[in-house]
Amino acid sequence: MCDNWLRFASFVHRTQTTGLMQDLRTSVEKILGCDLAMSIGINDEIEAEKRIAKFLSALENLPTTDLYRLIDPQWVVLAAGIGTRIDPSSRLNKNLDIWIGTENVLQLSRRYLLGTRPHIVVINPQMAERFSQFDQTEIDLRLGTNAITCVQPEPDGTGGALRAALTEIKNSTSEFVGVSFGDEPFLNQAMFIQTLVSHFIAQADVTLCAKAPETVVDKGGLFFDADGRFCGTTEWYDMTQAEQSHMRENLEQGNAYTNTGITLIRRQAMIERMDRLKPHKNGTEFHHVDLVRLFYEDGLSTNAHIYRNKIVSGVNRWSNVLIGENMIYEARRQQLAQQGVRVDPSAQITLENNIIQIGSGCHLIGKVHLDQNVIIGDYCRLENVVLTGNCVVGDLVGLKNVVANDTIFEANPVGSSITEPIFGLAVQSQIEDSKFNCVKVGHAVDLRSIQAFGTVIPPQISLKERVLGVPVKPKNWWFDLLVDSDYKPGIFAFGEKKHLPDWKKLRDHVRSHSENELIARSIQNPDLCQIAVQAVVDLLDLEQSDGTYITDQFTAEEIWGAIFEMVKLSTGKQDPYRKEKLAARQTAYLLIHQFQDQDLDWIERLKLVIAGNLIDYSNTRVVNNLSHNPRYFEESLLVALSSDFSINCFSQFQEYVIEASPKRLVWLIDNDGESIFDMWFIEQLAELGHQVVVVGKQEPASNDTTLADLHEISRSPEFQKLRDQMRYGHVTFIASGSATIGTNLNQSTSEFANALLDADIIIAKGQGNFFTTQGLKKDTFYLLLSKGITSEESTGVIADRSKAIDGLILGYVPANVRLENTLKDYCQQQN
């Protein structure tokens, strides 16, 4: 009975101990960021588990908070080397400018460093100067994320690098500091795991990772005392002849070890001894490994871990780079070949991780990088391709010189013939020399030299040398002179409205309006109609890697710009609103005759110009009003003449325009119908001596006036005076480059940008231009009617819909003013 009880108690104890050790192991692996068994690099599984068990035993009595402090090292990455053997001029930095896949040498050197703390990266002054020219995104691209930089002023060795980082080291709460190098991209994770495990098994104050070398000449050799205690390292050029002979003898016996520089050091003890480091090389260099000898002399515990696995040298020479690259590329070629992928013998393949979803019969050529979430279908041909984020490449797609992020390439039907001479695979979608970011590309396309962002390219289309989708901020020198840094072409981004209860209705409105208004005007064929509708749906559903819709970051104007373009590509209809534009134009011609001969003052003329926005046959409400009252337009304009401005900055307009000396004015045109009134008013501005640049759309967008429309209007009999003014250069027509509602300044042509920079005053017509030009660094007058919720919220003007016309706005915003509240609030404060 007693024996059974003892056996049971022993079983319970072992079970509890095993459970506790497993919990400890889980915690340790979470802190270190790896699976110990898979990462330790010991082929003998029993021996590996023994080593891990000893390591965990050294930690088993520690509370979790102490565990983090103890085994989560503060890594200091020494990356201040100039690398003159890579490039004698040192313009090409060996840490930053040598890329293998999507990571450079520095990032690859940091990838296996254990723990959770930000790495302290020591850089040289030249690197710091480069970083000062970059924004944070560009710095992270080269440096990697989760890093703290310290500058080493002089190239005074690894000890000097630690001194440069000393302030940040003192701020750390870690018990141990790890030292590694920014030019060692080919080291295995096992090297760091084994060094850390050995360090804690030995319960050392300092551990240096060493290797068994092929030669000891010009190496830093390890020395041990008579009791076998590790007492320090000595560089070959600092050794006595006896020490060099000793190293050679040990090499012959297989007992010679040289240091790798990878070190774990007790932080506080290191800080206390930094001032005791002695210089090497004529007093120009300090070596951090000399701390080992100082620790030994002071009676602290020193430990050398001999790493027995293969070590590939860092990137001190191009030959080292080639050896390391070939090792990586050969491993990837073998891996993919085992998965049934045809890889060219010279292909340079990099993968985000070892798991890749790739179909049958694929062929990879040249430089190819695939992120971990990339999916490749069957019979695809990839040559010089970078796919990042959640990219999906469907069957029979050929990509050559393509960079894509979060992009879907639709699959093609697999027929009976899937090969052809020379090229091998007979792909049905051929895409070359292109760049995509969050795009869906239809099947059976032929695309060459395409740049696309946030859009859908319809199937069975051939395009060449196009920029598609939502325009990104240009990198032209003049852009920052035009607008402030947080400029966006619209009042709000879609994602900013997610908290609203009618968020889904907003998305549904985009779809329904696209289908029932834009697409219905563009095509009658039901098949083509469905393709266009599906493109809009796909755009609204496009997701980024973080799970958010791409449209969340876009303004309504940016989304409509992409949709206008997509519908043109899908249907071939370039100007869907042409009929309504011409009807509005003819109506405006008739109406202008009734007013132009009247003796109107400047206020009344401005009211007519603003009220002309009503002449819009694409507006359902306007068309309904007109059906009930054929004189709706005429009566509304008459009412406008006697109405008050809801925002009245006429005094500024009178001072800066009407009574001012001749100025350079830029007039941003809006709808086609009201542009007749604009031309009438512009004639009068030119008569005052002003030089007026009238800006239309580059391409049709809704019922807005294009540059071609402006020239059509100027040729009408009503505008003989305007033609004369154009002949003498008093009035000029140009295109903005924008192809959406309003004026997307990200699309500005150089001609338009120069016109804005040269202008004394901007006059922006309509809601769209008010929404999209806020933040202009130019004095701007806004002439518009307040219509709809967005306008009401941004202008502060709620029009009385019971009136024939209401909500006339003549606002003024000086240069460099960004509206914090409504336009009405701002203008009232100024007046």
Image: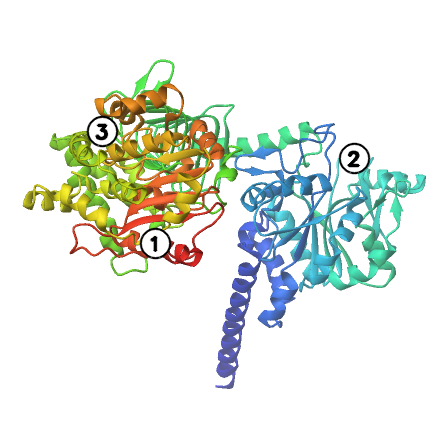
Mark linked to residue 215: 2
Tag 2 and tag 1, C-beta contact below 8 Å? no
The x, y position of residue 223, in whole percent, is: 84, 49
From this viewpoint, which residue is outermost toward the top? Answer: 421
Relative to 612, residue 787 above or below: below
Badge 3 is on which residue?
575
Q: Amino acid at mark 3?
A: Asp
Badge 1 is on which residue?
794
Q: Of 5 and 254, which appears nearest the observer? A: 254
Residue 53: quadrant of the picture: bottom right
The x, y position of residue 502, in whole percent, is: 24, 58
Residue 420: quadrant of the picture: top left
Q: Amino acid at mark 2?
A: Thr
Q: Earlier in the sequence, mark 2 or mark 3?
A: 2
Relative to 49, residue 244 above or below: above
Looking at the image, which residue is at 72% across and 63% down? Answer: 203
